[in-house]
Image (cartoon, rainbow, N blue to C red):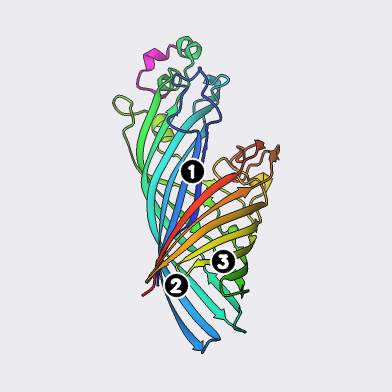
């Protein structure tokens, strides 16, 4: 069989603050924080019955496509001599965006046991897989506009030197290429299906996902160019523009999901699907970040429809996620760089997601 489905999706945008007027260009390109992550699996599956009408084993190999659009604003340390740096210029805002895609390979092992005509028991295991994503990155670094320091030290006479650029409000705009990895964590799942009648099937499923294997993103940049500074850039400007380290670590825990579903055959070729799920949160308050907001344990309701036309299966499913309000007050430095990595504040909201799956049985 061949199936194509979207296994993971994340789409969040945040605009939380504006720049300060002491920097010549106080605006940032695009959203302050955002992530648009899509993982689609194109899977080829094969199965064999080892005990007639009792036990079957299956293997699925998938080509995995990952698309990542990631933006954020960070604060860089001012590299000038501290005696030349006035408040609030000790930190320099840098806006970045990364847009790329990549491919990986996934594997799934499955087993189906039918102890009776009405009861089926299934289990599946998917090992961890990695998608290498490559693409283009853009940086905007707003250097301080500090006319008092600039004029008092006659930095106009140092045109072309670091002190000139770090006090006259220069805006650096840089293009580069980037590479990172998306880790799709391992999961173990199992379920029961009870055929209550010729039309109605009731299912109970559970899945344990090793989200602790996902450590966030470690961006690596190469081929920096288009530094909009006339002539050769001075050392500190060049170093600031070409040493971006935007590793975004997270600390997640493993999590369990439990699902109760019904499948009702409305017609011989149309099934109506419904479900209720409890989804344990992999995140904690201390690891809540702008790009991966998770309010806690969630309840999910689902409704869908599936069509069977000859060898083709087409299904549509929508779900609503109800999640609790969350108040984050603790600041946490996850990567040990001296700056807080999480996002304090009050967070609330529900999510609505629609998924479409297309399958063809050979």
Q: In 3D space, how far apart are the residues under numbered discs 2 and 1 (Cα atoms)?
A: 29 Å
Q: Residue at x 62, y 69 (%)?
A: 202
Q: Secondary structure at mark 1?
A: strand
Q: Quadrant of the N terminus?
A: bottom left
Q: Is 159 one of the magenta-colored residues?
A: yes
Secondary structure at numbered mark 3? strand
Residue sitting farthest toward the front: 267
208 left or right of 362?
right
Which quadrant of the figure has residue 141?
top left
Q: For mark 2, what is the residue?
A: 60
Residue at point 56%, 56% (across, down) = 303
Q: Would you name the residue on which mark 1 appears?
A: 35
State the CA–CA distance, disc 3 to disc 1: 34 Å
Question: Which of the pair 8/53 is nearer the observer?
Answer: 53
Q: CA distance from mark 3 to mark 2?
A: 24 Å
Establish if 220 lies above or below 327: below
Residue at the spot 44% in from the left edge and 32% down from the top edge:
30
Of 345 and 44, which appears nearest the observer?
44
Q: Report x, y in % for residue 110.
A: 52, 75
Label 2 packing within 10 angstroms: few (<14), some (14-19), many (20+): some
- Taking the magenta stretch, the answer to whether it contains residue 91 is no
63 above or below 163? below
Local crowd size for mark 3, using a 10 Å CA cut-off: few (<14), some (14–19), many (≥20): many
Q: Please, what secondary structure does the residue beneath circle 2 have?
A: strand
Q: Is residue 162 visible?
A: yes
| Residues drawn in magenta | 153-162
Residue 260 x/y as whole percent? 64, 63
Q: Nearer the viewer, residue 87 or 130?
A: 130
Image label count:
3
Per the image, the residue denoted by label 3 is 263
Q: Position of residue 252 (x, y in %)?
A: 62, 53
Give the mark nearest the N terminus, 3 or 2: 2
């Amino acid at each position: 069989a061949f199936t194509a489905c979207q296994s993971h999706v994340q789409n969040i945008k945040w605009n939380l603050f504006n720049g300060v007027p002491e920097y010549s260009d106080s605006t940032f390109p695009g959203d302050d924080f955002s992530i648009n992550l899509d993982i689609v699996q194109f899977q080829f599956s094969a199965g064999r019955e080892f005990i007639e009408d009792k036990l079957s084993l299956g293997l699925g190999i998938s080509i995995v496509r990952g698309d990542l659009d990631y933006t954020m604003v960070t604060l860089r340390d001012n590299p000038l001599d501290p005696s030349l740096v006035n408040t609030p210029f000790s930190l320099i805002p840098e806006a970045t965006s990364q847009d790329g895609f990549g491919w990986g390979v996934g594997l799934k092992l499955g087993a189906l046991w039918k102890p009776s005509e009405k009861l089926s028991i299934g289990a599946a295991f998917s090992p961890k897989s990695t998608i290498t994503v490559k693409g283009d990155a853009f940086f905007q670094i707003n250097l301080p506009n500090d006319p008092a320091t600039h004029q008092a030290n006659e930095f106009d006479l140092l045109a072309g030197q670091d002190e000139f650029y770090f006090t006259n409000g220069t805006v650096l705009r840089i293009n580069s290429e980037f590479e990172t990895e998306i880790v799709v964590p391992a999961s173990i799942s199992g379920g029961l299906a009870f055929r209550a009648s010729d039309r109605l099937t009731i299912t109970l499923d559970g899945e344990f996902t090793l989200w602790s294997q996902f450590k966030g993103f470690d961006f690596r940049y190469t081929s920096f160019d288009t530094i909009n500074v006339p002539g050769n850039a001075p050392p500190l400007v060049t170093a600031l523009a070409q040493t971006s380290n935007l590793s975004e670590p997270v600390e997640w825990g493993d999590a369990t999901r439990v699902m109760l579903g019904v499948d009702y055959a409305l017609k011989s070729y149309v099934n109506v699907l419904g479900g209720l799920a409890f989804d344990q949160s992999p995140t904690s308050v201390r690891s809540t970040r702008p790009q991966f907001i998770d309010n806690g344990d969630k309840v999910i309701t689902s409704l869908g429809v599936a069509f069977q036309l000859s060898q083709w299966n087409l299904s549509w499913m929508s779900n609503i996620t109800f999640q609790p309000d969350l108040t984050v007050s603790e600041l946490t430095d996850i990567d040990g760089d001296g700056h807080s990595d999480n996002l304090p504040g009050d967070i609330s909201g529900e999510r609505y997601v629609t998924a479409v799956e297309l399958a063809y049985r050979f």
